[in-house]
Image (cartoon, rainbow, N blue to C red):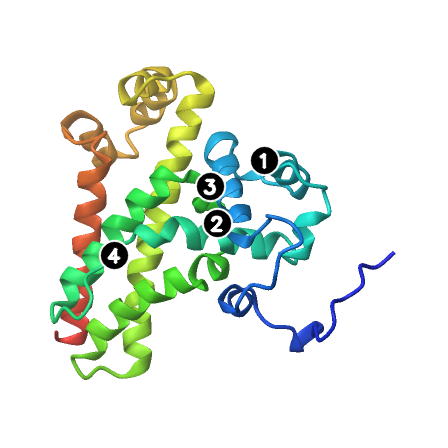
């Protein structure tokens, strides 16, 4: 049986968004359940058990409410993910009003990497959910403003920000996936991983088809320095933006 709508509640395309509902004055609650409590509980579950563990039933158990109670506050998984992303993103402290676009975008990228590593479930969230929350949009607005201050057209400004965002998410998703792979196999770090994969590597290198990769395998000294690798790649992206846009 469908849940009866409260008086004045809209439906479908006319229904107020999650964020509009959050900013409305709260009515006298029939229960202590709020969007803030739901978000906090969902983040705790995801951090401890992984993103797949966040279900309405698991959430209800943690909050001590009936399984259907959360549906009075969120419309489904997308709403729940958005609440989670917004909550953990509040601590991002990207410079505001800075004239140095590079400082702003670099800070945004480095902090987003740290945030994703602290909350690995962010790596599997749909991109629109990750970006379209008040906290994420506030950060994006700072990056866009820093670029727009140089007189760039709107398309170039957004494309530059998305280039940085795509690099961050792609790089960190790979980093998290590698860590999960090592953990599943019981490998403590890079040395154990390379030792376990050595038979495959020896055969591939013996073919003589990959001389540059072989040189990397023997000569590279930062194979496990993910922070350095990320920062280097990020600077390459920022250098490219500066060269392309002349800023």
Residue under label 4, please give it: 108
Question: Residue visible at 23% across and 34% down?
Answer: 211
Q: Which residue is under mark 3?
A: 121
Residue lying at 48% horizontally and 30% vertically, measured from the top left: 48
Give the residue drawn at x 32%, y 71%.
Answer: 159
Find disc 1 in the rendering and name its residue: 53
Mark 4–mark 2 contact, CB under 8 Å? no
**Hey, which quadrant is residue 144 in on the image?**
bottom left
N-terminal-most mark, 2 or 3: 2
Secondary element type, mark 2: helix
In the picture as drawn, the residue positioned furthest to the front comes out as 28
Question: Which residue carries the number 2 mark?
Answer: 84
Tags 2 and 3 touching, CB below 8 Å: yes
Give the alpha-carbon distance from disc 2 to disc 3, as whole Å. Answer: 10 Å
Identify the secondary structure beneath mark 1. helix
Cα distance in 3D space between marks 1 and 3:
10 Å
Left or right? Give the position of 124 relative to 115.
right
Report x, y in % for residue 200: 39, 21
Where's residue 106, x and y in %?
Answer: 19, 56
Pinpoint residue 13: horizontal percent, then vertical percent.
66, 76
Residue at the right extreme, as displayed: 1
The residue carrying pointer 2 sits among few (fewer than 14), some (14 to 19) or many (20 or more) residues within 10 Å by Cα, namely many
Tell which circle, 1 or 3, labels the residue nearer the N-terminal end.
Answer: 1
Q: Secondary structure at mark 4?
A: helix
Relative vertical location of residue 186 with respect to residue 246 in this rendering, above or below: above
Q: CA distance from mark 4 to mark 3?
A: 19 Å
Tell me which label, 4 or 3, sits earlier in the chain.
4
Q: Are marks 4 and 3 in contact (CB under 8 Å)?
A: no
Q: Are marks 4 and 1 in contact (CB under 8 Å)?
A: no
Callout 3: helix, strand or loop?
helix
Q: Residue visible at 13% across and 75% down?
A: 246
């Amino acid at each position: 049986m469908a849940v009866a709508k409260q008086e004045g509640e809209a439906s479908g395309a006319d229904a107020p968004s999650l964020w509009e509902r959050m900013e409305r004055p709260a009515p006298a609650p029939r229960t202590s359940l709020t969007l803030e409590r739901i978000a906090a509980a969902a983040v705790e579950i995801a951090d401890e058990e992984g993103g797949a563990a966040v279900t309405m039933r698991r959430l209800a158990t943690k909050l001590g409410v009936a399984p259907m109670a959360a549906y009075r506050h969120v419309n489904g998984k997308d709403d729940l993910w958005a609440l989670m992303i917004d909550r953990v993103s509040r601590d991002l402290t990207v410079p505001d009003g800075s004239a140095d676009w590079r400082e702003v975008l670099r800070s945004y990228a480095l902090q987003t990497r740290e945030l994703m590593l602290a909350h690995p479930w962010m790596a599997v969230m749909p991109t629109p959910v990750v970006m379209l929350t008040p906290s994420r949009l506030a950060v994006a607005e700072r990056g866009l403003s820093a670029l727009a201050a140089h007189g760039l057209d709107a398309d170039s400004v957004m494309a530059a920000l998305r280039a940085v965002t795509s690099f961050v998410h792609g790089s960190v998703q790979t980093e998290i996936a590698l860590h999960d792979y090592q953990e599943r196999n019981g490998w403590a770090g890079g040395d154990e991983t390379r030792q376990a994969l050595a038979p495959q590597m020896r055969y591939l290198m013996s073919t003589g088809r990959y001389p540059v990769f072989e040189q990397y395998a023997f000569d590279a000294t930062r194979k496990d320095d993910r922070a350095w690798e990320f920062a280097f790649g990020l600077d390459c992206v920022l250098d490219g933006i500066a060269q392309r846009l002349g800023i």
